[in-house]
């Protein structure tokens, strides 16, 4: 199995990308990794390994670049070359922590969509209180969506959740402003009817306040709404931990209590860190394309490599294609 990694994408590149890749080849003996980026900078952190190779380029897509223009003009950028490795058959999948819009454009223009999929969806697994997590899609690949798109999101999310996350008959929920069948706008009302009549384990409408309680395994919505939910979950978790830290550092008594409870707080923080589940998959493309957080460290990349390996091994892309063709 071959995975191409954009070694220059993200805030901590290339160091954390290289360290994450080295951890992955030590853990999994069936993967070969191509690190795409500046060879000299990569070699500063890389211990030679016969299953890690470097594809040199000194061109990078920046976070400030306009995504589509950058992909079209920077043909030798590390992200574009990683996607090209997939398109050329030299890699089974690619991963990047770089510019999200540019990665989506690289996926569409270089890797290509599965025939029959109208819109790809960006789908992270977000944490739940019980630790099981849920898949949310779309979180930004499409600002606007039609009911048929959300139906396809639900199908792709169900296949991924069953094959990669090991959930039998994943529960699919439609994000809405209430749980009643007739709630919502025209998009959600029409989507409800499609999901109700599809071969899915559809549990109906779900509200945003219940998501972290694990009310569904797969939650579908349009990219505009999904992105706001994602950012709200991120921001809330960060704010809660900041407030907790401030409170625990406010007196000697609370500092002593914090020292005792530190291991438990660390477990809680890991539970609420969605990067532990891997990256956000760009579902609907001809091969797995995974987006990891821009601030990802080696552990986050390792989790994404594990996720990617399972997607390739379980042939998630092929199963989506077969299901859509029916």
Image (cartoon, helix red, strand yellow):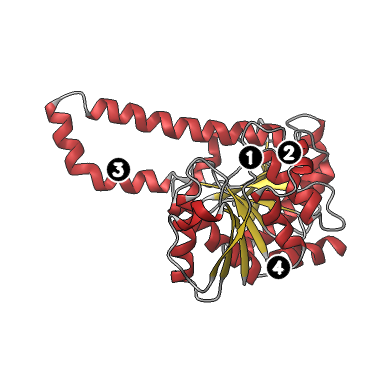
Give the SS element for disc 3.
helix
Mark found first going from the N terminus, 3 or 1 = 1
The label on residue 265 is: 3
Are the residues flagged by discs 4 and 3 in contact, CB closer than 8 Å? no
Give the label, 4 or 3, closer to the camera.
4
The label on residue 180 is: none
Q: Which residue is mark 1?
A: 99
In the drawing, does residue 209 fall left or right of residue 205? left
Residue 168 visible in image: no
Q: Residues within 10 Å of mark 1 (few under 14, many from 20)?
A: many
Image label count: 4
Q: Which residue is mark 4?
A: 90
Q: Residue 43: x, y in percent?
A: 47, 58
Rendered residue at 52%/50% (across/down): 133
Quadrant housing residue 261: top left
Q: CA distance from mark 2 to mark 3?
A: 41 Å
Q: CA distance from mark 1 to mark 4?
A: 23 Å
Q: CA distance from mark 3 to mark 1?
A: 31 Å
Q: CA distance from mark 2 to mark 1?
A: 10 Å
Give the label, 3 or 1, closer to the camera.
1
Q: Which residue is mark 2?
A: 70
Q: Nearer the viewer, residue 325 or 11?
A: 11
Give the label, 1 or 4, closer to the camera.
4
Give the SS element for disc 2.
helix
Q: Nearer the viewer, residue 264 or 282?
A: 282
Q: Residue 105: x, y in percent?
A: 75, 44
Q: Nearer the viewer, residue 135 or 298?
A: 298
In the drawing, does residue 165 fall left or right of residue 24? right
Mark found first going from the N terminus, 1 or 4 = 4
Q: Is residue 36 above or below residue 191?
A: below
Residue 262 visible in image: yes
């Amino acid at each position: 199995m071959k995975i191409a990694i954009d070694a220059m994408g993200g805030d901590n590149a290339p160091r954390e990308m290289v360290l994450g890749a080295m951890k992955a080849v030590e853990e999994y003996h069936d993967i070969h990794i191509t690190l795409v980026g500046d060879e000299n900078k990569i070699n500063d952190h890389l211990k030679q390994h016969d299953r890690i190779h470097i594809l040199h380029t000194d061109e990078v897509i920046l976070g400030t670049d306009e995504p589509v223009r950058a992909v079209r003009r920077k043909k030798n950028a590390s992200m574009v070359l990683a996607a090209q490795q997939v398109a050329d058959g030299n890699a089974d999948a690619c991963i990047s922590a770089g510019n999200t819009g540019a990665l989506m454009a690289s996926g569409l223009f270089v890797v290509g969509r599965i025939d029959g999929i109208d819109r790809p969806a960006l789908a992270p697994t977000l944490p739940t209180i019980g630790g099981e997590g849920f898949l949310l899609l779309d979180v930004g690949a499409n600002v606007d969506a039609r009911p048929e798109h959300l139906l396809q999101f639900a199908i792709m999310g169900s296949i991924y959740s069953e094959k990669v996350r090991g959930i039998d008959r994943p529960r699919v929920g439609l994000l809405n402003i209430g749980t009643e069948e007739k709630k919502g706008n025209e998009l959600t009302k029409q989507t409800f009817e499609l999901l109700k009549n599809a071969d899915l384990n559809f549990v109906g409408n779900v509200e945003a306040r219940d998501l972290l309680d694990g009310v569904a395994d797969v939650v579908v919505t349009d990219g505009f709404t999904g992105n706001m939910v994602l950012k709200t979950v991120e921001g809330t978790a960060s704010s809660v931990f900041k407030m907790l830290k401030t409170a625990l550092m406010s007196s000697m008594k609370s500092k002593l209590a914090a020292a005792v409870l530190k291991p438990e707080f660390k477990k809680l923080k890991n539970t609420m860190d969605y990067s532990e589940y891997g990256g956000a998959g760009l579902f609907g493309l001809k091969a797995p394309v995974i987006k990891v957080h821009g601030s990802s460290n080696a552990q986050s990349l390792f989790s994404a490599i594990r996720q990617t390996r399972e997607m390739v091994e379980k042939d998630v892309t092929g199963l989506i294609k077969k299901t859509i063709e029916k």
